Amino acid sequence: MTEKTIYLDNAAATPMRQEVKEAMDPFYVDVYGNPGSFNSVGHEALQQVDEARKTAARILNCAERELIFTGGGTESINLAIKGVAFAKKKGHIITTTVEHHAVLHTCEWLEKQGFEITYLPVDRCGLVTPEQVRDAIRPDTILVTVMYANNEIGTIMPIPEIVKVCKEKRVLFHTDACQAGCSQNLNVKELGVDMFTLNGSKIYGPKGVGLLYVRLGVQLEPLVHGGGQEGGKRGGTENVAGIVGFAKALELSQKEKEQENTRLIKLRDYLTAGLLQHIPKAVLNGHPTKRLPNNVNVSILDIEGEALTLLLNEHGICASTGSACTSGSLEPSHVILATGLPYEFAHGSIRFTMGRDTTKEDIDKVLEVMPAAVQRLRAISPYNLKLEEYISKEEQQAMMEQYTKVIVQ
Amino acid sequence: MSSELNIIEGESTPITKPAPATHADVKAKVESKNWFYTDIVKDHFFNPRNILINDADAEKLEFDGVGMVGSPACGDGMKMWIKVDKKNDKIVDCKWQTFGCASAIGSTSMLSVMVTENGGVPVQKALELKPMDIMNRLGGLPNRKFHCSVLGDKALRAAINDHFRRSGQTERIIVEGARIIDPDLKITDKDIEEAVLDGADTIEKVQHKLKVGVFNKSCLPAVEELIRFYKEKYFG
Ligand SMILES: Cc1ncc(COP(=O)(O)O)c(C=O)c1O
Ligand code: FES
């Protein structure tokens, strides 16, 4: 039964590129110096960190000193949100209900410290509107943080429009762009953001390396105090290999961005159309067009996601589910619930996130295996839920029509 | 990748096995399928024993008891049918259907084998079966998957009770010493007791654990009272 592995979990982790690994290799054994040391070994390390920072600054279109390298997306997010909160000491923060836990749990913790948080609800497609942000801003609002693209359902938020509102109201804006690194516009000046988070593990780079862009002039209290590295905003000897690898990965993914986007969008729509066509009582989660080129997320009634994931795994297909049964006190996907769908849909959800290696043959294989796997689980399921009881016929029809339009285009 | 099945971002590959970069490498190295579950669970998941595929079969086989627990909203659900040799008071057939995770499927499959093996198992012995016994036969389940084996066990008890009811042996019906608090989620006072023992000492925490009252808010006052009661009882 062992077949070729079809890895469709790139939203969880991307395989590191060979070129990135090669770029990192020298910095473990050969170039071991501390970038902070005044000697030749240290200097070489420093040069490479500087070089990496230059590359990242060029891609983000910012100054080098506006960049802070961190230990991953979670740390960048913590630094952005808590950093502003601690600098302002009190106030109100606006975010959304569909953020990554790195944002949600940080905000929940700040609530306990006396900050006030507004969690903006999203629509069925996972979107918040600039108007919602405008209405939520108060005189004491210190920060708005809205993710660029959602890690579960792939919805892309209207960042430039939200930024416009924040600028008018003179409120700082941060975006968690971890999932947007490969496919979206990363030009912070064009986007107008004040802070911007990226990480290595989603751009075919190393895990445990992140980046935070902080516009000059933004007051940020550091979280990790130490030897003054990263402009005093993040103490600790630099992760030289990681930083070098991150910059390399960022550079390479930027080069092939347009081409990959075109290719992946075709595959994405092909997979979605195939799933919706061949699997009864399946709905697409997220937005049909405002979504990441590599993300397909569907909910299938009557069946449970984990069992489906394991059946697919047996065919070499690696996917993820938002299911987690409540009797085990496991939380099902907060994102799918936030889009207004009931628990049944979260438990039957499955996410495919494609990558550089994904081919049409891979997708054909998924489309070949999925209907049978679903049928198999439906056959042993005691339920036969009615889609109409959850989603009106009109809404279903609209989704399908919108979708067919997308396919035809 | 099967070590974490929920969407949890940032899962990590061990450093000894770096995720390779080139196309060919990726396909080759991820090939080794580390299963989250034991081979026995895997076998029962892929080849569930005694599964009821066609609902109409239940009628044909003239079962003596049916039990159903869980709900699609909780992410689990189990229906079980049993046939009883009334003369010898033995379970001779056990069929089931589930909306559940792989461990629920695997452990219920094992349970259905355990209550029918060697020409049938006395009803009394079946009632004495503990989820732990199923676990042992399966070679273990991951910690947080223990409750999955409880699901089949509960469905079996419900089916046996149904059999007692239908055959007029009402004195044998076992009321689980538990009172249903949330009828939608079939959450009992026992569940709340366990949650409190587990450290959930506020209504928020209990709800976080059990989802009690998420669909049926009218039960919340009763839940609050029980939390107070069990807190008093165990923690003074
Ligand atoms: C949207 C989003 N934000 C934040 C993170 C956290 O990043 P990290 O795992 O690098 O800490 C992830 C992924 O893990 C993500 O997908
Ligand atoms: S039945 Fe709850 S996770 Fe298995």
Image (tube, coloured by chain):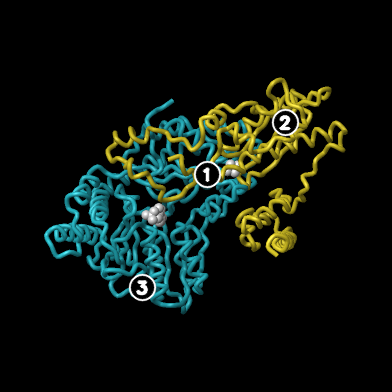
Chain colours: A cyan, B yellow
Secondary structure beneath label 1:
strand
Give the residue number, with chain letter if any, for mark 2: B81
In x, y percent, where is residue A308? Answer: 52, 37
Position of residue A284 in the picture relative to residue B189 (left or right)? left
Residues packed near mark 1 inside 10 Å, few (<14), some (14 to 19) or many (20 plus): many
Q: Residue at x 65, y 33 (%)?
A: B97
Residues packed near mark 2 inside 10 Å, few (<14), some (14 to 19) or many (20 plus): many
Q: Nearer the viewer, residue A268 or A200?
A: A200
Give the residue number, with chain letter if any, for mark 3: A221
Q: Quadrant of residue A240?
A: bottom left
Q: Chain of mark 3?
A: A
Circle nearer the viewer, 3 or 1: 3
The quadrant of the rendered image in which ligand 1 is seen is bottom left
Label 3 or label 1, whichever comes before in sequence order: 3
In x, y percent, where is residue A86? Answer: 41, 74
In x, y percent, where is residue A53? Answer: 22, 60
Residues packed near mark 3 inside 10 Å, few (<14), some (14 to 19) or many (20 plus): many
- Disc 2/disc 1 C-alpha distance (Å): 28 Å
Q: Residue at x 35, y 57 (%)?
A: A72
